[in-house]
Image (spheres, grey):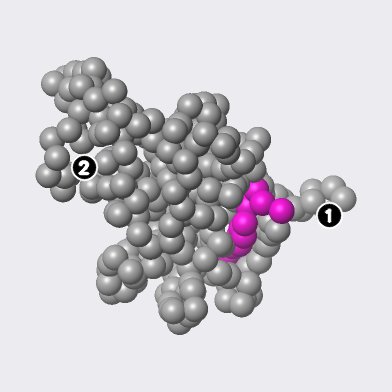
Amino acid sequence: MQLEQQNRAKPNSEGWLRVIGLGPGDPALLAPAARAALSEAEDIIGYRTYLQLAGPFRDDQRVHDSDNRVELERARHAFQLAAAGGRVVIVSSGDPGVFAMATAVMEALEQANDPAWGTIDLQIIPGISAAQAAAARIGAPLGHDFCTLSLSDNLKPWSVIARRLQLAAEADLVIALYNPGSHARPHQFNEALALLREHRTPETPVILGRSIGRTDEQVIVTPLAEVDPAQVDMRTVIIIGSSQTRIIEAAAGRRWVYTPRWYPEAG
């Protein structure tokens, strides 16, 4: 209760900071609260690709773009502007709390030397995550228990990633994989596939969702045994089905994938 009251306390600073999620990139899927924050902002901060998706902006709005690997610096810059009285928005892809900017904002706040940062009116405005967007395109593969894992070892060792992936596979969870591969680490997705194939049947449905909600969107459904790493890059989210995930071959060649809400052993 004390924490809840603290979060609702009126901030001392006149500035505010909003961390918004763009969702998958389709303007129609941007939350109204996020759209309102963008409209009211004086300063808009983010990775330049995401800012292009969030725009266009007015001439009276200041846009601060940066590279994709400076999340903490971006968060600190936003706090500085908001502490000075600015109305600031940080733009994130998908949902800002899922492998995205909300965590960097919390990290910057925890490390802050300026007590004024703690008085800023801060809100995290959610968006549709990449896994949710890809799942919706193809049906309901996340209809039962699932987990999300990032294959990037920039901030955690590969041994930790591999262990978590193994445990998730053994637990028969549907698994959504983010950051599956890049030019700097092309081998990791192959290693992940090899591990998954030890615990899932070759026919397990796999969804490859690339650039969901954008003009170059692509959704591929393929058996685990036939997944082609060449079809996967950093703009791809991968959903690995569980033992219960099913494919429906509907009329006119339409294909759906879903994971039932029930489990055979239930009851």
- Secondary structure under tag 2 reads helix
Tell me residue 146's x, y (percent): 44, 50
The residue lying toward the viewer, choosing from 92 and 201, is 92
Give the quadrant of residue 58: top right
Amino acid at the residue labelled 1: Gly
Q: Quadrant of the N terminus?
A: top left
Give the number of marks: 2
Tell me residue 228's x, y (percent): 62, 76
Instruction: Give the mark nearest the N terminus, 1 or 2.
Output: 2
Point 24% across, 25% down: residue:
13
Q: Quick check: can you spot residue 169?
A: no
| Figure check: 146 above or below 88 | below
Left or right of 195, for residue 48: right
Q: Nearer the viewer, mark 1 or mark 2?
A: 2
Left or right of 110, for residue 147: right
Tell me residue 218's x, y (percent): 69, 59
Amino acid at the residue labelled 2: Leu
- Secondary structure under tag 1 reads helix
Q: Is residue 121 magenta?
A: no
| Number of residues whose C-alpha sits closer than 10 Å to that of mark 1, classed few (under 14), some (14–19) or many (20 or more) | few
Q: Which residue is mark 1?
A: 253
The stretch in magenta equals: 203-215
Q: Quick check: can you spot residue 256?
A: yes
Left or right of 83, for residue 191: right
